[in-house]
Image (cartoon, helix red, strand yellow):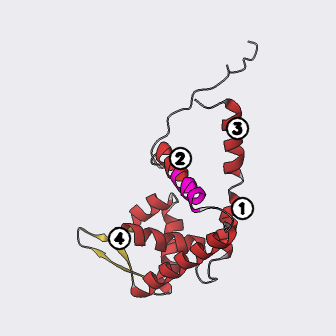
Amino acid sequence: MAAQSLYEELGRQLSAIGAVKRGLARILPSECPAGSAAVLTLLERHGEIRISRLAELLAVDMSVTSRHVAHVAQRGWIERSADPADKRSRILRLTPAGRAMVDDLGLRTTEMFAHTLGDWTDDEVGQLNAMLARLRESFGDCRAPHTRVPETRPPTRTPA
């Protein structure tokens, strides 16, 4: 097990990851904000899915997901059709224009990382990818019910 100070530093580093996320947001086209980009990326990764599943993957409320879906549908990047198994539900899928936008987003992201991490070796970038994947795997499905993390120090007691 790593030393307590290493976990504390990890917490600080992950808290500061917002700078990376802001850098990624700055490269997005103005017509495709982060929520829309997330919808397109998830549809590209998972294929046709229900809006309820998309909300789970985004880990946001259904109303927020619906706004993102409406935004990308208005731009012709996705199509919505009735779910044959449940006519009340909708199946979402990328259109050719949506696939083109996903390709553009991927190119922008790749170019941004290539520029920003230009002084990193291929091995260092590979190590970062492997460690981030391992970190995500360690946390598992972030939408699953959480178990309580044991306290590392005894709780303070108030006098009775």
Farthest residue toward the left?
85
Dominant secondary-structure state across the stretch colored magenta: helix
Which residue is under mark 4? 47
* Residue 114 inside the magenta-drawn segment: no
Tag 4 and tag 2, C-beta contact below 8 Å = no
Judging depth in this view, the residue of 66 and 109 nearest the camera is 109
Foreground mark, 4 or 1, reads 1
Q: Residue furthest top?
A: 160
The disc, 2 or 1, on the residue closer to the chain's N-terminal end is 1
Q: Which residues are magenta?
A: 122-130
Which amino acid type is shown beneath numbered disc 2?
Leu
Q: Which residue corresponds to mark 3?
A: 8
**Would residue 100 be seen by someone viewing this image from the given angle?**
yes
Quadrant of the image occupied by residue 129: bottom right
Identify the residue shown where x is 59% and y is 71%. 34
Tell which tag, 4 or 2, sits nearer the viewer: 2
Image x and y of residue 105, in percent: 54, 77
| Label pair 3/4, CB-CB below 8 angstroms | no
Q: Which residue is mark 2?
A: 135
Query: For the N terminus, which image quadrant?
Result: top right
**Please, is residue 49 above or below residue 147 in the view?**
below
User: Going from the N terminus, do you reach mark 3 or mark 1 first?
Assistant: 3
Q: Name the one closer to the observer, 110 or 146.
A: 110
Q: Which residue is mark 1?
A: 19
How far is the residue under mark 3 from the one under mark 1? 19 Å
Cα gap from disc 2 to disc 1, whole angstroms? 19 Å
